[in-house]
Image: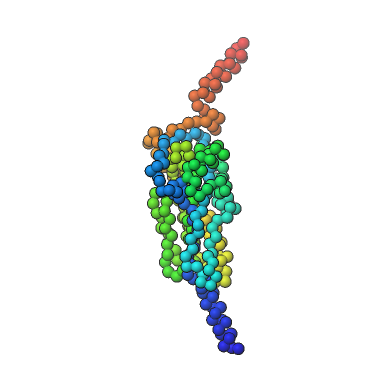
Amino acid sequence: MRFGIYVFRAFLLLWLLASCAGQQTRSRSSVVDYLYPGKEEAAIEAAIPVLHVPLKVAIAFVPEQRRDSRGRNIWTGRATLKGLTEVDKNQLLEKVAENFRAYDFVSDIEVIPSAYLTAGGSFQNLDQIRTMYGVDVIALVSYDQVQFTDEGMLSLTYWTLVGAYVIAGEKNDTSTMLDTVVYDIPSRKMLFRAPGTSRIKGRATPVNLSEELRADSLKGFHQAVTAMIGNLDRQLQRFKEKLKRNPEAARIVYRSGGGGIAGPIECVAMIMLASLILQRRRS
């Protein structure tokens, strides 16, 4: 009887150790794969963007890729990371949208549900969104998150439109990379981009590993969004300075009623109205 108890305890110990070792789970989406599914970047020619101010902006997560899990638990065969739910995505996008709404040159911003973006939809899909929501500019958000439950040093390597980011990771760590690219849809021109990263060192025990990793996953996304919003502000200022140095990089067209900014037609109409009022007063 005592021997059987020892065997059971040894088996239980091995199961607990196996449940927290030998896993590397990844959840990701990619702007590159969404916009250029056939790797035909050269075939899509970008034109000079015409920005209608104040801007009508959309923001959306690009579709996820199939989840990649290596070193699954040898007893259950299951991975831990499940990716973002639609509720999680909406909360994260609202944080970014609030930042855009603070800009005086943005009149409206629409949070686009994931169901309206198709995997590999490219600019044809963006044209559909432009027609549906009446927007010209879209901020596309992608992410790459890896949770390590292996011994030793590991890393996340995420390829963006301009290069790769590498984030180191250790056992029970959650490494997150968020990347936002802002595109003018009609011209197919990328205006600017901003990344945000996060690394959370886990302290999970074998008993509550799944719950802790899930909590670390959401915390990692929110931290990365906060970092990304700060980078968005800085990249936007650089974009403004770029337009000042090189006005030919984009054309600015002011909408009627655009937050006090009037174009030539509106100015003529205001002058005619003022003259009419003055003439009636004299009469």
The residue lying toward the viewer, choosing from 270 and 138, is: 138
Q: Is residue 253 above or below residue 14?
A: above
Which residue sits at x=43%, y=42%?
190
Which residue sits at x=55%, y=60%?
82
Q: Is residue 45 above or below residue 86?
A: above
Side of 146 where 164 appears, left or right: left
The residue lying toward the viewer, choosing from 39 and 126, is: 39
Q: What quarter of the picture does the C terminus occupy?
A: top right
The residue lying toward the viewer, choosing from 4 and 104, is: 4
Residue 143: x percent and y percent?
A: 49, 54
Q: Is residue 115 visible?
A: yes
Residue 189: x percent and y percent?
A: 43, 40
Residue sticking out furthest to the top:
283
Q: Is residue 233 visible?
A: no
Q: Is residue 150 above or below residue 226?
A: below
Residue 198: x percent and y percent?
A: 48, 57
Which residue sits at x=59%, y=88%?
2
Residue 145: x percent and y percent?
A: 49, 58
Which residue sits at x=57%, y=71%?
207
Q: What quarter of the picture does the N terminus occupy?
A: bottom right
